[in-house]
Amino acid sequence: MASGKRVDTGIHELEPMDLDNWLATSPRRLNRLAEALDCKTYLEIGVSEGITFNAVNVNTKTGVDPDFQFDWQALNDGETIRLLPLSSDDFFAQESENSRFDLIFIDGLHTYDQTYRDLQNALLHSHQGTVILIDDTIPFDVYSCSRNQEEAVRLREQATGVVNLMWHGDTYKIMPLINLFHTAYQYCTIMDQGNPQTLLWRAKKPREIDPLASMSTLWSLESLAACDYLWMLRNLQLFHPVSEAEGLDRAAAGAQAPIP
Ligand SMILES: C[S@@+](CC[C@H](N)C(=O)[O-])C[C@H]1O[C@@H](n2cnc3c(N)ncnc32)[C@H](O)[C@@H]1O
């Protein structure tokens, strides 16, 4: 997520908030989950300056970023704090196949193909109680969907005269894939109190798919490249939109309940 002061898209009404509040969104959600699920291990893909990473209260934390924006070596102790200057693909390629994380935040490269691959690899390192938070699954506006941040900002300024660094990429296109193919997982998308983010956790039994929704989702997949901003607006229900309070409660309860 890049920053912006006023956020009102008409789809997800985010209250105007200052930058500090905006940056507190991910830590607040992750810490609520960490507490509810008594998480001991945390993985963050895309760490940047470490604002969220440093604010998450979990015993053992792993952060991965090919371009850390702070002195990561000073913080890294290789045990409770493991920071790896790698792309997510390279990290997962070298990570022990036995490693599992209780809580995972996917916030690396915001293209749908990379985010989808990060999700697949994160699932390999999950257990039945893991919750995964995926950033930027609802674009802020049509410009925000560009796969290139610089272009998003430039086109927005050209069309509206507003300079706003907000960029979500086309991460939202993972949602039809999750909806149709990942029926072993429950998910919902937090729409209020900050940046929209999707929560995903293992289902106790296959998640049901509405047959009509399934048809239109299938069509979307056949032309995934054509799933543009208007498609996203038309198909918002597919994202399972919820409030922050409801989403966190659902994920915590769903991931906590014992598998029969
Ligand atoms: C939005 S920032 C992360 C912000 C951070 N999660 C937070 O909340 O404070 C995105 C980061 O992803 C990193 N990134 C870009 N491509 C990546 C990749 N392939 N694997 C992992 N991280 C990547 C960028 O270097 C950037 O620092």
Image: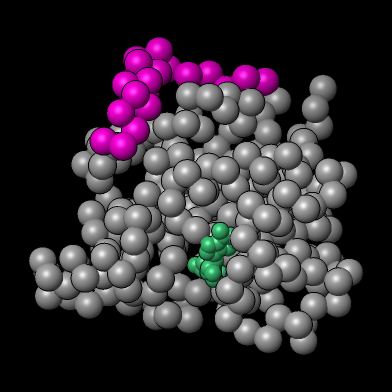
Closest to the observer, 178 or 68? 68
Residue in view at x 80 percent, y 78 percent = 76
Residue in view at x 51 percent, y 32 percent = 178
Q: Is residue 107 visible?
A: yes
Residue in view at x 32 percent, y 21 percent = 219
Please provide percent x and percent y for residue 227: 29, 37
Please provide percent x and percent y for residue 90: 68, 55
Give the magenta part as a residue range.
205-226
Position of 119 relative to 220 (above/below): below
Residue 252 left/right relative to 58: left
Quarter of the image with the N terminus in it? bottom left
Among the 4 quarters of the image, the one containing residue 65? bottom right
Please provide percent x and percent y for residue 108: 54, 60
Closest to the observer, 191 or 42? 42
> Is residue 206 part of the magenta span, yes or no?
yes
Position of 207 relative to 81 (above/below): above
**What colouring method underlies this structural image?**
one colour
Please provide percent x and percent y for residue 218: 37, 20
Q: Regarding ligand 1, which quadrant of the image does it lie in?
A: bottom right
> Is residue 173 part of the magenta span, yes or no?
no
Residue 200 left/right relative to 102: left
Position of 154 relative to 72 (above/below): above
Q: Principal SS element in the magenta part?
A: helix
Q: Is residue 246 visible?
A: no
Residue in view at x 80 percent, y 58 percent = 41
Position of 180 relative to 129 (above/below): above
Residue 64 left/right relative to 18: right
